[in-house]
Amino acid sequence: MKRIFLKSCFACLLLLQLTSCTEPSDKPKASYQQVDEIADAANISADASISVISNIKSGIQVWDLQSNTQKFAWNNQEDAINTVTNIHIAADNSYVVTSSRETFTLWNLLEGEPEGYWRIDEASIRDVAVSSLGRGILVGRSNGKVMFFEPNTTRRLEFLGHQEKVNSVDISPNGFYALTGSNDYVAYLWDTRSGQVIHKFEHSSRVTKVSLDDQGRYAFTADSKRDAKIWDLTTGQEVSNLQYLARQRIFTTASFSPDGKYLLTGSPAKRMNLWDVTTGKELKEWYVSPRENSQPPTAVVYSVAFINNQQILSASSSGLVEKWDVK
């Protein structure tokens, strides 16, 4: 009897291990094909009502996610082909900033027209962000410099706090605060009016992703190894460190829920995760859909957003925007 019992226990443990290694069985509630080819960049608005997606052949497309209809189709007149690799929608859905390695463009999301086009020759552009009303644009570059630029006043401020290339940037809706992360193992929260550092968030390896809570409560900074931290913006103190077993986890996008209870992240390997802000505990995991017949069958999650606490959206390199239930 003991042998039979031990064999049964071993079989159960083996089944549990195999089950834990398989992908979650959840399927998207809805799926919208926005480009037929591989998408090079995509962003979903904070209120989950608009998506902007870029493809080398199709250019830049703006979609109304509530009606699943295309609003605008854009192309940079100065560029022979569309090479946009970064997209950010302002928190109030008024403007979009897009960038390639050498140029960035500000688009009016209400009228569907470009309002400015700028070229940077000094160093390649790594990431961009735009504030509400298009008041300010943040440009992170490979030489470690971050430029804050006001299109209406042409005011320009260079943040020189980083020592190596900048990988990720984000900006507060009012345009007064910037969060930037670099290969120098540091993320800074700084004031765009003065260039003064407010908080310094240190890591043990290069900072690959940063994200600000639009309500001004939290910041998220993640490095290339073990640390993915949520910080209190008032005190600068650590709130939690995301709990996962892997030695390394790379994040490509992150978004806080409107009520501040949850963080939603995406990765380069189809994975999308929901986390508890206070504890850092993982609450749910999904895998976005790869392109049909793609080899290998994977996708980069470019953007995530909360519809509410029961549903979320993802946009990935497969050219799909997918809707998911949170159970």
Image (tube, rainbow, N blue to C red):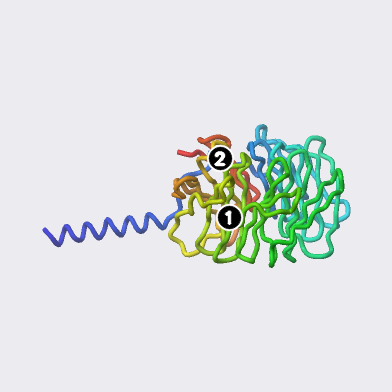
The structure residue drawn at horizontal position 64% and vertical position 36%, both measured from the top left corner, is 47
The structure residue drawn at horizontal position 86% and vertical position 43%, both measured from the top left corner, is 152
Is residue 60 found left or right of 119 in the rendered image?
left
Q: Secondary structure at mark 1?
A: strand
Which residue, given by chain and number where applicable, does mark 1 sit on? 221
Disc 1 from disc 2: Cα separation = 16 Å
The structure residue drawn at horizontal position 68% and vertical position 38%, both measured from the top left corner, is 50
Q: Amino acid at mark 1?
A: Thr
Image location of residue 60, percent across then percent down: 76, 48
Q: Is residue 143 above or below residue 230?
A: below
Which of the 4 image quadrants contains residue 175? top right
Query: Looking at the image, which residue sits at the far left?
Result: 1
Query: Looking at the image, which residue sits at the far top?
Result: 67
Which residue, given by chain and number where applicable, does mark 2 sit on? 257
Image location of residue 158, percent across then percent down: 78, 57
Image location of residue 77, percent across then percent down: 88, 51
Q: Earlier in the sequence, mark 1 or mark 2?
A: 1
